[in-house]
Amino acid sequence: MKFSIFFIFVYTISMLVLSGCEQTVNNAELPFEEKIMVEGILKADSIIEIVFSKTVPVLDTHNIYTIDTVNNRITTLQGTISIDGISYPLIHMNNGRYRIFDAQQQSIKGKIGSMYMLNASWNDKIIYAQTQIPIAHKPDILSINIDTNRSSVYGYQDYIKVFISLSYHPEDKEAIVHTINTISPFDNSFYNEIDTVNYKEFNYPQYFPPYYFTKKEIPHISSFFTWLYAPSSKTISEALYMYADSKIITKHYDKAMKEYIDTQYFGDNLGGIFGGGGTGIHWNIKGQGLGLFIGYSDNILPLPLQ
Amino acid sequence: MTYKLFMWIIFLILIMPCTSLYSQQSAISISGIISDSLSGETLIGATITISKANNPKIISGTYSNKFGFFSIPSVKPGSYIISCSSIGYSTKTIPIEIKKDNIRIDLSLMNRTSKTKEITVTAQKEQASIQSINTIELSKDFLKQMPSIGGETDVFRVLQLMPGIKSASELSSGLYVRGGSPDQNLILLDGVIVYNPSHLGGFLSTFNSDALKDIRMIKGSFPAEYGGRLSSVLDLTMKEGTKEHISGSAGISMISSRLTVEGPINDESTFMISGRRMYFDVLTSLISKELSDNTPQYYFYDINAKINYKLGMNDRLFVSGYFGRDVLSEPKLASKEGTTFGLDWGNSTLNARWMHIFSPTLFTNFSAIYTDYHFSTLFGQRSGTDTNSTQFNFTSLSKIRDYTFRGEAQYFAYDNHTIKCGFEAIHHKFTANATDSIDISQGDLLLRANTQQALEIALYAQDEWKIQDNWMMNAGGRLYYFQNGNYLQFEPRISTQYFVADNLHIHASYARAHQFLHLIVRNDISLPTDLWFPSTKQIKPSMADQVTSGIEYRTDDKTWKFTIDGYYKEMSNLYEYKDTASFTLGLPLEQQFTSGNGTSYGMEVFINKQIGSLTGWIGYTLSWTNRTFAELNRGRTFFPRYDRRHDISVALSWKLGSSWQLGATWVFGTGQAYTMPTSKYVIPDFTGNNGIRTAYDFSERNGYRLPSFHKLDLNFIHLFSWFGLPMQFSINIYNAYNRLNPFAQYITDEYDPATNTNKSVVKQITLFPFIPTFGLSATF
C-alpha cells in the first residue's frame, strides 16, 4: 500500500513537472493595426469591380459572415485605377464595391495586356498596387490515356483512371496558375473531385486543386490523372459518355499570385503553442493594406474523353 | 590564389615563434603535474608560483593546463620556494634547489574539508592569468547547491544564471550567449564536439555533473585554440577516476536516476563510468499496464566512461566515450486514426588521447576522435482505414559522422611567453533531409536524404605574452580550410589584460570567428526539427566579429568581486528557412534557406561574494540582439525570440551549519519576443477553391513581447549518514511563489454561451507552477 502511494505521489509530481497550465488572458491588450482589405481580381472581358473592406481587432467578436458584411465594408474610399497611364476615379456602387467608368459612363472591363495601377486612401491609410492581365495561353492536349481496369478508391469500387498531359508555352513574365476544373458528368449524378495523383507515373509533381508554375522551359508539360466513376452496371464507353461535357479551365494570373498561393495559409490561427511562426500572407497590395489586385484571364478547353 | 598565398604567409609568421624560440631557450625549467593527493585526479587551473627562499615576492608563476601540467622556464640557479594552490585545496609550499638541470616536480594537493567557506564561481588566482577574460569557471560544489527541478542539477541551467547567458524558455536548457543562438556555442566534452547537448527536448543537458571534473565557459572572443563556432566555448573535462579505491555515488531524483563508479584498475590506470536514465516509461508501466499502453513512451539515457593509463613519467593515454540517446514515441495502443509521431536523437563519441611531455618546456597531446550524431523527427496522420497508410508525413533527419585527428603543442618558451599551436583535421559526413509529403496508400513521397562529405582543417597558433608584470596579452590566429565550397579563412584573435592595481584590472579583446556548420530550424512549427547543414558553394560560412572590454575589481580580502563588461558583435551569413520554404518539391534543401545578418551588443554587471557562509552573486545584463534577412519580415530588422532587454539573476548559497545547506536563485527577464496578430480579416475566395475564411495579419516578426518572466527557486540540502554512507537529501521548490510565467500565448476561438457564438480569446500557457520535488544521493 505504502509502495503504491509512493508511486502515485511520484507519478503525480511527474505529471506536474511534464504538464502545463493554460489560462485565459482577460483584458488582453493586443496591438491593433487597422488596414484596408482589397478584393480585386481583374478578369479579362469582365467588369472591373473592386471590394474594399477593413480589418478588425483580433478579439473582435463578430463571426466570419458578420465581418464580411456591410458593417465592415468601406464606403468612403478615395482612389483611382490607371489603365495604361489613363486614370479613372473609383466610384462606390454599394456595400464597399467600387467600379470605374469610361467617358460614356459604361463600366470598364478588363483587357488582356493592359497595365493597371491602383492608388487609394481611406482614414489616413494609403494603398497602391500594380498588375497586368496576362494572355490566356491555350494549352495543347498532348495525350489522353484511359486505364480501363476498374480500381478501388478509398473503399469505393468502380473507378477508372484517365491520364492527361498538356503542353504550355507561357511567356517569361507570367506566372500561370493552372487550375483543373471539376470534370463532372453532365447529369450531375456524381460530382467527381480531382484527387491527389500518383507521382511515380510522371516527371512533374501535381497538386490538388491548383497546379501552378513559373516558366522554366518551353514548352512546359503539365501531366495529371483523375478518377472517373465507372460503375460495373455501365460499360466503359457508357461511363465516359457521362463525362462528355468535361472541360479544362486554365486560369492565368499575374505573377504576384504565386506569392499568395505559396503563403495563403500563413495567416491562419497560430494553432496553440506549437503553431506557426505567424509570418503573414504575402499580398501584392502595398502600403497600409492587404489583399490582391491581380490580373486574370482564363481559357476553356473541351476535354474529349471519348 | 594570391589571397590564399597571403594567408599562408601570415600564418607561417605566426607559428614561427614555436620553432625559433625553442632553439634559443637555454635556461633551467621547473615542470610537473599537479594532482589531488587522494584521488590522483589532475587539477586544472592550479596556480604555481616561485619566489626566492629569502624573499616572498613572486618571481614567476603559471597555472596548470587541462592535463595538470605546468612549466616555469628560464629559472636561474638558486634556492626557491615553490607554492601551489587551487580552489578547494590546501596550498602546498616546498623549498627547491635549482642547480644546472631542469627540475621535474609533481605536486599533490590535499582536498580541504567542507569546513571551507570558499565556494566560488571563478577561480581565485594569486597569479594573474589572461585566461580569465570572458571566462566562467563553475565549481561542482556550487553546482550541487543550486536549485533544480526534480532534484537533477544541470550544468546548463546554472550557466544560464550568469550575465550574458540566457535561456529561450523554461523548457529549454539551450544557451544563448551574448545574442548568439545555441548552435553558435562550441561544446566540448574531453575535447570532443557534442552536437546536441540536450535531453528531454532541451529541458536537461546531456552532461551528468557526477562525471565532470572541470566546467569552463568562454563567453566570447575565445583564444585561437578554439574555433568553428561564433559565440562561445563550453569546455568540459571528464573525471579520470580515483586511484584510491573503488568508489562512487548514486542518486535518484524525480526525473532520473544515476550511478557513478570509479577506481583503480592497477597501479598505473584508473577508470570512471557514470550513467543516468530517465524512468518515466518504467514508472508508467509499474503503475498500470493500461496507463503505460496509452501514454507516450519517453526515455533518455547517457553514459560517460573514461580509462586513464599512465604509460610513464611523460606519457599518459586516455580513452573516453559518451553515449546518449532520447526516444519519444507514440503510445503502444495508439489510435488507428489520428496523429502518429516519433522523435529519436542522440550522440555517441569516442576519444583516444595521448599526452606526451617532450621536454620540461614542451607539452603535447594528440587525439583521435569518432563522433556520431543523429536527430530524426516524424509526424504523420493516419487515414483510419489502413494503419500502414498516412495522409501526411513530416520528417526531419539530421546525421553527422565525424572522424577527427587533432594535435596540440604547448611550449613554455620564456617565463613571459607561452606558445600554443596545433592542428585539427575533421572528416565530416552529413546527412540532412526535411520533407512534407502527401501519402496515399500506394506509397509515400519521402525524398532521398541529402548526403555530403567535407574535410575541415584548422591550424592555429597563439602566444600568451606577459608584457610586463601587470600587463598580459594573448595574441594568435587560426587558419581554417573547409573543403565544401573550398573556403580558406583566417581568424585573428587578441585579448589583453592590464592591472591598474593589484585588485583592479581592465581588459579588452577582439576575435573573428567562422562557422561552417549551421543549425537550421523550421520557423513555421515550434517542434524540434534540428537540421545541421554544412557550408557549400551556395551556403557561405557564417562569420562574427566581436569586441569586448571590461573592468574587474576585487576587494583586498578577496571576499567581493565586481565586474562590468561590454560587448559588441556583428554576425553575417546567418541562415534560416525561407518563409516560403517547400519540402515537397524535391528541391535541394539549401534552396530553402535564406541568409542574413545579425548584431548584438550589451553590458553585463556582475557582483560576486566569494567567501563566507553566504556566497553567491547578482548579475544584470542589458542587451540588444537583432537580425536582418532580406527574405524574412519583408527585409525589416526584427528581434529573435531570445532577445531580452533586461536580465537579472541572483544566486545564493548558504551553509547553515554542518549538515544543512540552502541554495536560492531568483531570475527576472524581459518578456520573450513573440509574433502575435495585429488584426483579423476575411479572405475572399480568390481562386474559387477555398471558400471564405478568416485570417490574421502579422505586421512584424517577433514584434510583440510576452509579459516579463521571474521566479524564485529554493533548494534545501540535508547531509546525513546512513549505514555509514554519506547521504544527501535535497528538497527543491521550483517557482516558490507560483508565478504564472508565460511560455506561449496564442489566439483561439471559444464558445461564449452568453452570445451563443464563438469568440476569439487569448490563451496563455504556463509550464511549471509551484513544484516541490526531492532527490536523494549517496557516495560510497
Image (cartoon, helix red, strand yellow):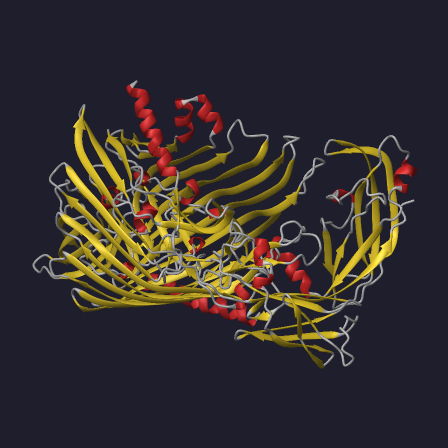
Return the residue nearer the eye: B625 or A69. A69
Q: Is residue B530 visible?
A: no
B609 to B143, vertically: above or below = below
User: Residue at position x 20%, y 55% from top?
Assistant: B124
> On the rendered image, what quadrant is the C terminus of chain B found in?
top left
Return the residue nearer the eye: A34 or A256. A34
Quadrant hosting residue B144: top left
> On the rendered image, what quadrant is the N terminus of chain B found in?
bottom right
Q: Position of residue A188 (x, y in %)?
A: 82, 43
Q: Is residue B596 visible?
A: yes
Q: Position of residue B127 (x, y in %)?
A: 20, 59
Return the residue nearer the eye: B411 or B230. B230
User: Residue lying farthest left?
Assistant: B54
Q: Position of residue A168 (x, y in %)?
A: 82, 59
Return the residue nearer the eye: B532 or B330. B330
B352 vs B66, left or right, is right
A61 to A296, vertically: above or below = above
Quadrant hosting residue B38: top left
User: Residue at position x 66%, y 31% from top?
Assistant: B385
